[in-house]
């Protein structure tokens, strides 16, 4: 996707002030190169004060293994 088409797509989804910040040097194919794009989306805040606490994701632990009693096999 040419750069202009990507920027137009991002603008269509509500991002504003989009600009090309630079290239990463990552080349996933002979025809593509990674780039960094900066922009703002109104109504989205990255501030922890306004966002509130972020809940910790549940962590799946190992299933408890029943303990064998001494003298049993």
Image: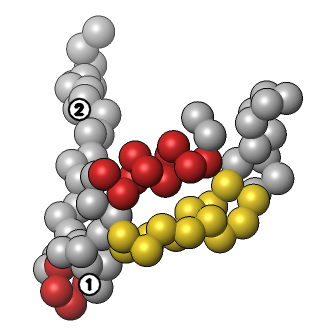
Q: Residue 5 at what x, y percent from top left?
A: 51, 43
Q: Quadrant of residue 51?
A: bottom left
Is residue 60 toward the left or the right of residue 55 in the image? right
Secondary element at tag 2:
loop
Farthest residue to the bottom: give it: 49
Query: Please, what secondary structure does the residue beneath circle 1 have?
Result: helix
Estimate how packed mark 2 is, as few (under 14), some (14 to 19) or many (20 or more) residues with alpha carbons within 10 Å.
few
Identify the residue shown where x is 25% and y is 29%. 63
Question: Disc 2 marks which residue?
Answer: 64
Can I make out residue 64 in this image?
yes
The disc at residue 48 is 1
Residue drawn at (49%, 53%) of the image: 7
**Residue 53, position in %: x, y?**
17, 76
The furthest residue to the top: 73
Nearest the camera: 43 or 70?
A: 43
Q: Quadrant of the C terminus?
A: top left
Question: Left or right: 38 with respect to 3?
Answer: left
Question: Which of pointers 2 and 1 indicates the residue nearer the eye?
Answer: 1
* CA distance for labels 2 and 1: 37 Å
Viewer-nearest residue: 68 or 35: 35
Q: Nearer the viewer, residue 29 or 56?
A: 29
């Amino acid at each position: 996707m040419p750069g202009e088409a990507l920027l137009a797509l991002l603008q269509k989804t509500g991002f504003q002030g989009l600009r090309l910040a630079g290239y990463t040097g990552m080349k996933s194919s002979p025809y593509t190169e990674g780039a960094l794009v900066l922009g703002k989306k109104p109504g989205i805040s990255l501030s922890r004060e306004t966002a509130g606490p972020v809940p910790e994701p549940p962590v799946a632990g190992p299933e408890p293994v029943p303990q064998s009693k001494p003298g049993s096999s």
